[in-house]
Amino acid sequence: MDREVVTKSAQATQKVGRDFGNNLKGGEVVGLVGDLGGGKTTFVQGLAQRIGVKERIISPTFIIVREYENKFGGNLYHVDLYRLENNLKQELINLGINNFSKDPKNVIVVEWADKARKYLPISTTWVEFVNEGENKRNITIRN
């Protein structure tokens, strides 16, 4: 069932991420879709708080993957595919995403996931962000 939320501040977008994180148990793959400045990393900041990540969450745009310990005994893998263009399937294998998803204690969150839609599990939860100006974001969660 789809759920749509409109936020009007970064704090509200983080709260949506925290609320979403309440339902995580480990083993999930979450695909984030939206333009630059859409609120994806802000959402991940809230999600990460809820699953016990202690470190500050920053975009992994230039290093592609950031890894943080989570409260499930695994890791949060925060992946950003923005800079990846060629041979995406091989790039994902090289990054180890297949290995991350084998551990049911891990949570994988992929920004710019629409680039890899056909390579992510069918069980992926999709979260779409639309930047409607200023701090207003339309967030749709598709299960």
Image (tube, rainbow, N blue to C red):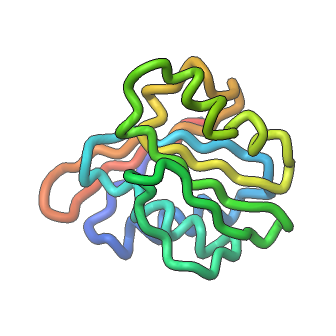
**Where is 49 relative to 72, above or below?**
below
Left or right position of 54 against 12: right
Determine the residue positioned at 65% across, 67% down. 68
Task: Indicate the quadrant containing the N terminus: top left, top right, bottom left or bottom right.
Answer: top right
**Residue 139: image x %, image y %?**
39, 49
Q: Nearer the viewer, residue 105 or 80?
A: 80
**Residue 131: image x %, image y %?**
23, 49
Determine the residue positioned at 77% across, 54% down. 106
Judged from this view, the residue extending furthest toward the bottom is: 54
Task: Indicate the quadrant containing the C terminus: top left, top right, bottom left or bottom right.
Answer: top right
Count of marks, rendered view: 0
**Residue 32: image x %, image y %?**
47, 43
**Residue 36: image x %, image y %?**
25, 47
When asked about the image quadrant of residue 82, the answer is: top left
Left or right position of 120 against 7: right
Determine the residue positioned at 35% across, 45% down. 129
Left or right position of 37 against 103: left
When asked about the image quadrant of residue 119, the answer is: top right
